[in-house]
Image (cartoon, rainbow, N blue to C red):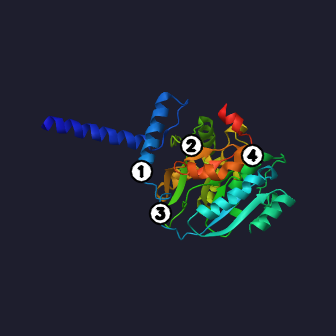
Amino acid sequence: MKRFLQSIIVILVIAISFIYYACHPTTLPTQDSKYQQFLRYIHYVYLKAKRDHFCNLHIPMSQVPIDIIIPVIEKDAQTLVLTIDSVRGNILQPITNIYLVAPESVKLRKIAQEKKCNFVLENTVLPVFSTKTNRKGWMKQQYLKLNADTIGTNEHFLIIDADTILIRPQIFATEHKEVLNILHDYWLCRKKMAKAALGFEKFHNVDFTSHHMLMCKTKLQALKKHLQDLHGKPWQDALDTLDVPEGSFSEYELYGNFVAQRFADQVDLVLGSNGLFPRNGLANIGYAREYLSCKCKSLTMHSFLTIEGMTG
């Protein structure tokens, strides 16, 4: 009996040690092997079993005020309205202002006025680069998000994509902790981009590209200073000259990896539980939101997602 108990204890110690290893930064591999996928699975199972203090039926309202920043272009005007309503209806902490960052648009200005949001021209937020390259679309929005600390009055702000809605009550920051949502999705190329930018050797084996992210001005400015000190040039030029494919660039991955390591005691990693929803099915979003809220915290409606494409 004594030997049996000793064996059980040894197994438990090994299991706990392995879970600890799977949930902490490890050396970035050259490829996403089956072993790496298994480690990631262990991390996800741990987070699923762990109580989410930021999103459950009984979370208290946080008193930490935040701003909401939504980069948007006209093609996302339809989902933008849903995004605005969803953050007002589901974030259980004071929202000081909602900022729509966009190119000049009569349509988007009208939405801003009707929804009592602040309209901000995107060119006033975009950082100044040393080269005159005309940055457009997806890349432009990522630089806007990384320079969003120039907007708003609060220390904390939630960046959320204009095609993403929150479907469950949640908070993003307390006096002591900030949330970092992670997804089951994973792209090693994004980690390699973060490694080239940050110079880190170890990374969390999870993906931070959750279509929305709580950012802290102090932490974002620390990230920019790190990039400038490491590369010897302004942060935007350091990122702009990285030798990585454009499709590998992720502002959420960059910020998430930096903060998760440099400010580990100030953040909690939680499952983002994001679901995809077809853009041409918006007429049924009310029913879907009620049904999917039992397993998802947010829904993303990319312009290329259709009912036909998702059902095959």
**Depicted 227 relative to depicted 88: above or below:** above
3 vs 4, front mark: 3
**Depicted 16 relative to depicted 126: above or below:** above
Closer to the chain start, of discs 3 and 4, is: 3
Q: CA distance from mark 2 to mark 4?
A: 19 Å
Identified at 46% across, 37% down, the residue is 41
Query: Residue 139 shows which numbered tag?
Result: 4
The amino acid pointed to by label 3 is Ile
Residue nearest the observer in this picture, 7 or 228? 7
Side (left or right) of 236 relative to 109: left
Q: CA distance from mark 1 to mark 2?
A: 18 Å
- Disc 3: which residue: 59
Residue nearest the observer in this picture, 237 or 181? 181
Q: CA distance from mark 3 to mark 2?
A: 25 Å
Residue nearest the observer in this picture, 185 or 285? 285
Closer to the chain start, of discs 1 and 2, is: 1
Q: Identify the element where label 4 is drawn.
A: helix
Position in image of residue 32 (x %, y %): 54, 31
The amino acid pointed to by label 4 is Met
Closer to the chain start, of discs 3 and 2, is: 3
Identified at 63% across, 56% down, the residue is 225
Characterize the local packing of mark 1: few (<14), some (14-19) or many (20 or more) Cα atoms within 10 angstroms.
few
The C terminus: image quadrant: top right
Characterize the local packing of mark 3: few (<14), some (14-19) or many (20 or more) Cα atoms within 10 angstroms.
some
**Depicted 288 relative to depicted 101: above or below:** above
* Residue 233 visible in rendering: no
Label 1 near label 4: C-beta < 8 Å?
A: no
